[in-house]
Image (cartoon, rainbow, N blue to C red):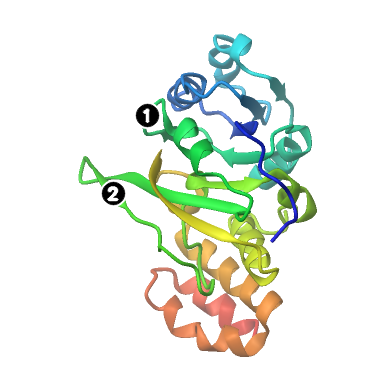
Amino acid sequence: MVNLKTKPNPLITVVTVCYNSADLIEETLKSVTEQNYSNKEYVVIDGASTDGTDQIIDKFIDLIDFYVSEPDNGIYHAMNKAVVKASGDWLIFMNAGDAFVDSEVLQKVANSLSDETDVLYGDILTLKNRELILKKSPPKITHMHRMPFCHQAVFTRTSLLRKFPFDEKYALSADFKLFKQLKSEEVDFEKIPITITIYDRTGLSSSQRSKGLAENIAIIKELDGAKEKLRLLPRLYLVKGWNSIRSFLKSK
C-alpha cells in the first residue's frame, strides 16, 4: 500500500478526454459539473476537435478548472497529460459519452475513501437491448488477465498514476497494463457497493474488442512471460477476429 493519508473531504479530480465528440460531450459535462461534492476538480483535455466540441465545452467553461484543446497522440497520451495537470488526491476518468449515475456519486465515494485503499472501484450501468442493466465488478481481485472493472468506475490515487503512467504504445489496453502493474506492486484494491457510471459501450475499446484482446495478450507476455501467453491462447477463439489470432500466433 502507498503510505499516504486520506484527508477529510479529499480533493477528487475528474478528467474528461475527448476528440470530435460533439454528439456525446454535453451529457458528460453536465454529469460532472452537477456533482454535489464540493471538493472536486475538473480537467478537460480535447485533442483539437473540429466538429464543434469546443463550442459545447465553452458553455461549461466556468465550471472547468483546466481545459486545453490541442493535438495529441491518442487517448492515453491525453490521459497522461491530464494526470500531470491534476491536483486531486484521487482521480477518475469520465470520458466523452460516459456519465455518473446521479449527482451524489462523488460524495458517496468520498465517504468510502480510507487510508488502507489505493484503488477504489464500483459497478456500472450499461445499455443492452435499449435497457440499462447493472454490471457488477468482482468483489475481490485475485489476478488480472483482463480488465476486472470498467475504467470509468475506478478511483485511483493520483500519485500512483504519476508513478505508473499509461504506456502509450498500447492504443487500447494501456489501462489494463496500468492496473496489472499496480496489482503486481501489491497496491490495495477495494470494491465498494456503489454504482458509479453509465458506461458508453460505443467507445474505442468496445468497438475494437479483438484488437484490444490481442493487446491484452501482448501485455501479459510482457509482464508475465511467454508461458502465460500460451495458456491464454484459447480465449482468443471466443472473440471474432481471425487477424488478431493470426498475429498472436506469429508472435510466438
Q: Which residue occupies 71% across, 46% down?
A: 5
Q: Nearer the viewer, residue 167 or 189?
A: 189
Dot 1 surroundings within 10 Å: few (below 14), some, or many (20 or more)? some
Q: Which residue occupies 59% across, 14% down?
A: 63
Query: Circle 1 is placed at which residue position?
Result: 102
Percent position of residue 182, x then y = 66, 63
Note whether 152 is above or below 65 in the view shown.
Answer: below
Tell me if 186 is positioned left or right of 98 in this view: right
Note whether 136 is above or below 37 in the view shown.
Answer: below
* Quadrant housing residue 132: top left
Q: Which residue occupies 32% across, 45% down?
A: 126
User: What secondary structure is found at the residue carrying circle 1?
Assistant: loop
Q: How many marks?
A: 2
Q: Nearer the viewer, residue 210 or 12?
A: 12
Query: Circle 2 is placed at which residue position?
Result: 134
Percent position of residue 57, x then y = 57, 16
Q: Amino acid at mark 1?
A: Asp
Q: Amino acid at mark 2?
A: Leu
CA separation, marks 1 and 2?
Answer: 14 Å
Note whether 149 is above or below 244 in the view shown.
Answer: above
- The quadrant in which the N terminus is found is bottom right
Percent position of residue 87, x then y = 74, 32
Q: Nearer the viewer, residue 140 or 95?
A: 140
- The quadrant in which the C terminus is found is bottom right
Q: Which mark is residue 250?
A: none
User: What secondary structure is found at the residue carrying circle 2?
Assistant: strand
Note whether 114 is above or below 11 in the view shown.
Answer: below
